Amino acid sequence: MKQLLSAFSALCLWLTGVTYASAADYTLTSPSGRLEASVAVNDSISYVCNLDGHRAFATTGLKLQLAGGKVIGEGVKASRPGRRSVDSKVASPFYRKSSIEERYNELTIPAGNGWKLVMRAYDDGVAHRWVYSGKKPVQIANELVSYIFPHDAVATAPYVNKTEPKSFQQQFFNSFENKYTVAEIDSLDARRLMFLPLVVEPEDGIKVCITESALESYPGMYLNASGVMPGALTAVFAPVPKSVKQGGHNRLQMLVEETYPYIADIPKARALPWRIAVVVDNDAALAATDLSYLLAEPSRVADTSWIRPGKVAWEWWNDWNVIGVDFPTGVNNDTYKAYIDFAGRNGIEYVILDEGWAVNLEADLMKVVPEIDIRELVEYGRERGVGIILWAGYHAFERDMEAVCKYYSDLGVKGFKVDFMDRDDQLMTDFNYRAAETAARHGLVLDLHGTHKPAGLNRTYPNVLNFEGVNGLEQMKWSGPELDQITYDVQIPFIRQVAGPLDYTQGAMHNASRGHYHASYSLPMSQGTRCRQLAMYVVFDSPFNMLCDTPSNYDANPCCTEFIATIPTVWDETRILDGRIGEYIVTARRSGDRWWIGGMTNGEARDIEVDLSDIITAEKQGVLISDGVNARRNGEDHRHAQVKVTPAEPLKVHLAPGGGFTLRID
């Protein structure tokens, strides 16, 4: 009842326009003063966030329900809080910029029983987390938080990928891949969970992106619209698994059979994850935020000099379809040598052996199929400057992690792509950290496929280069034209990518314009133009970036292949020049003295003008690859041109429907 009254009071304040600060016990402002959180401590803790005096969102009482009935955050009285301000610079290797300015004001509110609530206000968002300093183990039955918006606020949110509503427990098992639903909050399906990040527009211009960071050994947060009141998105968490059984895809997953009546077991003092609300007044600022990285725990890898990001020649998407060779292609050494040869002559750092190199249905990474000799492939790659990455199903990797990492590291393998976790309960988020730590000790990089959003792990363990949690290009192997991937592509930079890098796996050389796309498992194609695929290497954050198509198709398109091969995967600087969620985006990135600019549009043709006055100071030469005049009919039509660019005149580019462009400034 208290929770409901708190929510009702917050809604009344919203609707009547009452200045919440008059009832606030504390005010926390961002360094610029534009963002303000008015915090009320009246038996429980809640706050309202304003941007330039305009309401962004409110929260209900923030509480933790402990097993046994005790509630943290209840009965809290106003007291002298702790305050501090930080203005520093954070090194950010293997990220979209080499360093990040970190400026925030912080407020700490004691909550009793060894708990405190910590809040931070940055210029582009606010965050809160619970911190435990007690000595006794505790079990958290639930963490209570609801974000309150006007009931007609528009949300852009991903439901878990179940076509029919099921119980929440059934929905906790999901791949974190789905398109976005755009709807008013009061019309969202209350039977379904939404995973993070998601975006809400409470009023014209303001965007709120809700996500989390420092998600270590704690369940990920979902949101649900069946909250305490209209306009509320309420947190939901998976309980701790009590028993699991082997099953799922090729018996590589662990399926939850029974759960405990709590969401997290906390054996000692620790901080819980940050609850982040990015709050901005333009879409480009949303795509530019670094809050997920800044709020993560600092790196636990002392020496990162061995970590090598880069591009990867990948065989699974193109179904091992190399042509013009004198051997049957498939999962065999001859085929992988062809991929290594391609990577070597194009300066591609890695080749991946995806699913199939280990004996199927055994979940044992020490059992290799007879057609594959990994030692031979490692040596063949070493001679050509190409590292080998091995795909691993979750259970096969988890069951013997230490031995697997040591054996293959000693063999010369450079890392693993781990797949099919498909949960984010406490046991699974703990696995991600243990996998990262174990891999780091053995000098291995990781690509966590089949997992949730990054949530800070890439800062804490920078050997984890990529994460899936995105409806990537692999969907084109089996999805029909009803999947609007074109629109989705220009939503994710403003939503999913807010959380960190993504394993989208771009690079298709068969490109279908509107009306010509169809699913093909063995000869797949992309929706949209060739130039859109090239632009993704600039627009998407991906330190471990796939070339998804076959060497045969790349060899047939040397202009595009050579261009892709020169694009870095980590950057010294990133700027979002322009964009709107679901419509278009233009991103500029710098590596050393060279700038790259990439842009993509939705299903509408668009004329882009790119202001270069903040990028260059004098006339420069550049290489522009843009949609051809007939790209609206044939998505593979493109134009490759040497251009001169100047700070005095905007770059003008026409984008076909589903199109894109990439400019390299030399």
Image (cartoon, helix red, strand yellow):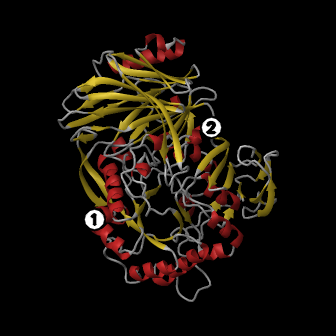
Q: Is residue 307 visible?
A: yes
Q: Residue at x 66, y 49 (%)?
A: 588
Name the one closer to the observer, 191 or 108: 108
Amino acid, disc 2: Asp
Q: Please tell me whether residue 62 is drawn above or below residue 555 in the rendered image.
A: above
Mark 2 is surrounded, within 10 Å at the Cα level, by few (under 14), some (14 to 19) or many (20 or more) other residues, namely some
Identity of the amino acid at label 1?
Glu
Instruction: Report how many numbered discs are placed on residues in the image.
Output: 2
Tell me what residue is drawn at x 66 percent, y 67 percent. 510
Is residue 514 visible from the viewing direction of this image? no
Q: Secondary structure at mark 1?
A: helix
Q: Nearer the viewer, residue 309 or 480?
A: 309
Give coordinates of residue 435: x percent, y percent.
34, 58
Residue at which label 1 appears: 402
Nearer the viewer's eye, disc 2 or disc 1? 1
Q: Quadrant of the C terminus?
A: bottom right
Q: Position of residue 456 (x, y in %)?
A: 42, 46
Disc number for residue 657: none
| Horizontal and vertical percent position of residue 327 | 53, 87
Which SS class for mark 2? Answer: helix
- Please tell me whether residue 588 is drawn above or below residue 109 in the rendered image: below
Is 210 placed above or below 95 here?
above
* Residue toward you, 335 or 590: 590
Q: Is residue 553 left or right of residue 333?
A: right
Q: Residue furthest bottom?
A: 326
Q: Is residue 440 left or right of residue 382?
A: left
264 relative to 600, above or below: above
Question: What residue is shown with label 2?
Answer: 283
**Is disc 1 surrounded by few (<14), some (14 to 19) or many (20+) residues within 10 Å?**
some
Left or right: residue 424 versus residue 321 is: left
Query: Which of pointers 2 and 1 lies earlier in the amino acid sequence?
Result: 2
Q: CA distance from mark 2 to mark 1?
A: 44 Å
